[in-house]
Amino acid sequence: MYRKFIKPLLFSLSIERAHRVVILFLRIVGLIPGGRWLLHKCYAVENPSLEREVFGLHFPNPVGLAAGFDRNGEACRELGALGFGFVEIGTVTPQPQSGNPRPRVFRLPKDHAIVQRIGLANRGLAVTIRHLRRPHEGVIIGCNIGKNTATPPEQAPADYLKVFRNLYQYADYFTVNINCDNACREGTAYTRDHILKILEPLFDFRRGQNQYRPIMLKVSPDMPDEVIDRVTDILLETPLDGIVATNGTNRRDGLQTSRLSLEKIGSGRISGAPLTRRAVEIVRRIHTRSGGTYPIIGVGGLMTPDDVRAMLEAGADLVQLYTGYIYDGPGLVGDICRALITDEVQRLQEAAKAVAEPTAAKTTEAAAEKAAEPTAVSAETPATAEDPTSRPTAEPAAAEEAATTPEPSEPSDSGLPATDPGAETTSARPEPAPHKPGEQA
Ligand SMILES: Cc1cc2nc3c(=O)[nH]c(=O)nc-3n(C[C@H](O)[C@H](O)[C@H](O)COP(=O)(O)O)c2cc1C
């Protein structure tokens, strides 16, 4: 439906106009009684095996919407109803700002990519508060915060703090966007000192609050590996909760789009397929350096369920989509969720097989030895399956779970799986990431 009818229609409009139409449509659907329920029924996939506990929050599934789509929190409830496990709004700055002159967002269909130099256009803190005041139970909202373009770098921490403290009660977690817009120099923006000057006032404010709000830091794919390591060390040494990796890239190498078209478009960050490899590489690097114990949200070029699998395997706890959603439409979230359910079922079946196989092998081996030496039963004789002490103790729960886990099923018409393959799988879910000691207010 999306590919055949809606996408050609939207792609006939400029990307910003198409975006506006979608947000308006969602808001109108949200006003109709039962509208959000219908969206949920059509698109959301629910299954216990998709649920995640990350930084103390319970996510219905690990697939979120990346920052930049709902910059003012206008349609976050409707976007949640479309099946996203969480929605990151923003980037929100203290004052409204119009961003760069239009056109400033472009499609690169040959590369399944988008170029944008929006310049953090948003309607500012006051309007975002108005939107977030509407009840949004059941939708996890992250808020991506930034500074106004006109604010000089030395006053940047005050901008971040202003948005953070005013939105603290409305969002479930925060992402600090330190990526350079057109008014900053990357060299100075990414020093440890500059990053800490932004983060420390946020930690101080949070210490005085009754409720804990995780703080994430969003990194750029253009940061050299040493800078990624530096940011990871900040994660290890401060109350920072996790990292969102990554934003769009300024690099232009390896694109199918002609040089001439790219020159016509001009500057901007590229999102989408050209980003996949670097984003996954960065997530793997952060995961390895941090010992796999801190939350990572993987974002960048996740266009298919396989891309998401690679990102999760690299160490991401949650993922976010943007460009993939534009090119593939609202069915992509469901496709990813169904693929993850299938993976979980397979994993459990393999675990059950791994438990069953050594038992069978031992039985055969013992029978063979018995046949060779019918009277010589020594202390070294391998135990057999008949011997109750020989039952493998590894993963008994997984074996039992797998034994009761049905085959992966086709989705029903509603988009929901017809059966509930993960219903017995809660013990196989990853452990929740720990809070930093002493940070719980
Ligand atoms: C049109 C557009 C606007 C964006 N605006 C923001 C933004 O305001 N703040 C932010 O942190 N990231 C922003 N992003 C970056 C995305 O959140 C995401 O990190 C990036 O697009 C990589 O993901 P993708 O390849 O799935 O699109 C924007 C991306 C696009 C395409």
Image (cartoon, grey):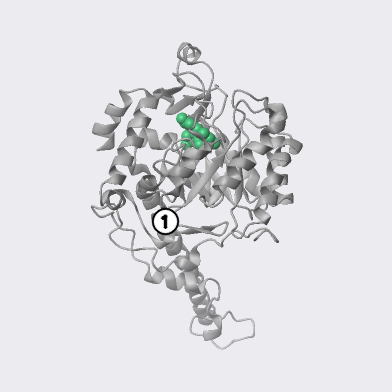
* Amino acid at dot 1: Glu
| Image x and y of residue 341, in percent | 40, 56
| Image x and y of residue 149, in percent | 60, 27
Quarter that holds the C terminus? bottom right
Residue 231 appears left or right of 344: right
Rendered position, 132 above or below 124 = below
| Image x and y of residue 108, in percent | 42, 23
Residue reaching furthest to the bottom: 375
Please state which of residues 249 and 84 is positioned toward the viewer in this rendering: 84
Residue 244 appears left or right of 3: right
Rendered position, 252 above or below 341 = above
Which residue was labeled with disc 1? 137
Q: Residue at x 38, y 34 (%)?
A: 326
Ligand 1 closer than 8 Å to the CB at disc 1?
Answer: no
Please state which of residues 218 and 148 is positioned toward the viewer in this rendering: 148
**Residue 232 visible to the viewer:** no
Around disc 1, counting alpha carbons within 10 Å, would you say few (fewer than 14), some (14 to 19), or many (20 or more)? few
Task: Give the tally of numbered discs.
Answer: 1
**Residue 264 visible to the viewer:** yes
Residue 309 appears left or right of 280: left
Rendered position, 67 above or below 438 = above
| Image x and y of residue 370, in percent | 52, 82
* Image quadrant where residue 352 sits: bottom left
Secondary structure found at label 1: loop
Q: Residue at x 73, y 36 (%)?
A: 194
Q: Residue at x 64, y 45 (%)?
A: 286
Please state which of residues 130 and 314 is positioned toward the viewer in this rendering: 130
Rendered position, 402 above or below 28 = below
Quarter that holds the N terminus? top left
